[in-house]
Image (cartoon, helix red, strand yellow):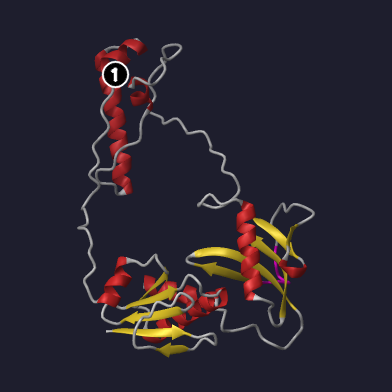
Amino acid sequence: MVECFKVLEDGALKPVDGFNQESDSVYLLVDHENRNIFLWKGKDAGVRLKFIGSRAMSEKRQDLGYHYQMHVLDQDDESPLFLAAITGEPVETSPKKSSYEIEPEAPPNLEELAKQQGISVEEATKEYQAQMDELGDKFGKMGGLTTRPKKTLLSELGSESAPAPQAPSPISSKAIPAAPTKVAPGDKKGRSQNELLEEATELLKALGELRGYSREMVVVGNMVYRVKDNYDLEELDTPLEGIFRVDEFTPRLICESGKVKVIELLKPTGSEEEIDESLTQNLSDLTSMFMIEIE
């Protein structure tokens, strides 16, 4: 049995007969048979409505029990599990493999390697076997089954693409550390900091002003900005360096689809009005939920 609710602007859940997939709406579907809760977000739904739906999903799970799993879905990116729930058809899953079936790396040309190093083939063979045994012990402790070992110095020297050494040197079983790779500021999707900043600005505009608080600063990506008029975000005059406490601020995380979009540093204005509860959740509830799942 799958219950379907339409999320309203005031946070209420309106029961509906079917899932209409309206692109400007947010739906909450509960699959009681498989104990799943789905939050479906239309591509044209407003930011506030999406966050209201997120809170409604958390409250629904608290009502039903933590043995229900939560799933967040965007329109046109529905999972097979969700499609199976609304169609009633079993989900197609590929059988799980008991281990990774990866072919081992081809051994190096030991004769050529021994010639380059000025040692006998027997000595080169012993060195190679010792390295393989050491790698096997390491992977065994890590719980690996048939994981492919990383290339060793020995195998690199034996490959055709590797340059010949300048002078003979003893074979070492220690791995050569890779050179650090510089990553441009941004996120894993390759978006620049400016793109993240634009997204955060639009997000803050959509959420609007806060009752009882003022936005003093926000964290976007790995940088801190001061909030000016019209939600303009300006870099701090002095770059941050060190460890800072935020006793006078109330931090608030704005998350969407498992990603932290913005961290707000809010300052109380002295007003007795409370923040819009339809948009907010308490992080302690998430912590409690996590601990219950572990137990």
Q: Give the residues drawn in magenta, as a range.
A: 245-250
Indicate left or right for 182 with 101 as reference: right
Q: Give yes or no for residue 247 being in the magenta stretch.
A: yes
Q: Give yes or no for residue 26 being in the magenta stretch.
A: no
Name the residue nearer the viewer: 48 or 261: 48
Q: If the image is split into quadrants, where does the C terminus sit?
A: bottom left
Q: Quadrant of residue 223?
A: bottom right
Residue 239 screen position, x and y as percent: 75, 52
Q: Residues within 10 Å of mark 1 (few under 14, many from 20)?
A: many
Residue 144 screen position, x and y as percent: 29, 47
Residue 211 screen position, x and y as percent: 69, 82
Residue 66 screen position, x and y as percent: 37, 79
What secondary structure do most residues of the magenta stretch adopt?
A: loop
- Give, as a three-letter code, the residue at label 1: Ala
Indicate left or right for 98 with 135 as reference: left
The residue identified by callout 1 is 124
Residue 111 visible, this orientation: yes
